[in-house]
Amino acid sequence: MDLAYKKQSNPKVACEVLIGHGVCHIINETSCHHTKKEIKEIVNRIAGKVKVDYVEVPQDVHLASNQQDKIRCGDNGIFKGLPKTKEMMQLNYIAHNIYETYKSDGKYIIDGDELIICQSNAATKVLQRVYKKAKVNPLGYWTGGIDVDSGATNRKLGSDMGEAVTGGGLHGKDLSKADVSINIYAHLWAEKLGKPIYIKCAIGDEKVKVHCENKIEEVDYSVIVEEARRYIKNKGGFEHFAEWGLN
């Protein structure tokens, strides 16, 4: 996505990624051409020396024409934003701390006083000393990394969006897609107001209705896209945004 936005101000992209066991498969529906060399350099920098299978095709003609003369909603969906709970913030803090030390993501669950940590790149005894009440690697050592639960695009919905998982994922699509922009917009306003936000939309919408408690406000879709654009920019780009999502 960062590469596409370097080449075009408003590219149209829907990219799917499957990675594991030495191979990264990418199918990219895009208005913006990339060479296989460019894609391979990005993949190898992020995932290491894996084989890259890259397929590039133009986006569906009807979807593309919907966006030609002005910014319109590029997807259907029902979305919600929820303020972060205390548990979500605790889990976010734990995940960041572990990643800072081991430079590898794990799988973490917190429910009240119960914390479960699955992290293959740290010795179980080490994590047990730090998180004394946690269950650490309850099934024992596991391989981890890109060779487990192969996938990439939207595999992290839960950790990226917390309890607000609805209406599609955050990654692999341009800002015209509701999955990206409306999810970001709903999250920001839910955090700002401290209240749940509910939004539904359809392809081609120029305005969407934002529900907050008993109030409904109509918002230009272009406004939502620009707010999401600023958010991504402040994160340092799509790649940095993809590291932790909305959390």
Image: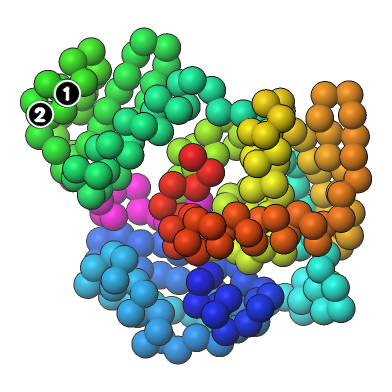
* Label 1: few (<14), some (14–19) or many (≥20) C-alpha neighbours in 10 Å: few
| Residue 90 location (% of width, % of height) | 40, 25
What type is the residue that disc 1 sits on?
Val
Over which residues does the magenta segment extend? Answer: 143-154
Which percent across, then down, holds residue 51? 28, 75
Q: How is the image coloured?
A: rainbow
Residue position marked by numbered label 2 in the rendering: 126
Q: Quadrant of residue 166?
A: top right
- Describe residue 110's horizontal placement relative to residue 205 as left or right: left
Residue 213 in percent (x, y) is at 82, 24
The residue labelled by disc 1 is: 130
Q: Give the main secondary structure of the magenta stretch.
A: loop
Q: Write the residue at 34% across / 13% down.
A: 114
Looking at the image, which is closer to me, 44 or 139? 44
Q: Which residue is painted at 86% across and 62% down in the image? A: 204
Q: Residue at x 87, y 55 (%)?
A: 220
Asked if disc 2 and disc 1 are in contact, CB closer than 8 Å, the reply is yes
Q: Secondary structure at mark 1?
A: helix
Q: Please name the amino acid that badge 2 sits on.
A: Val
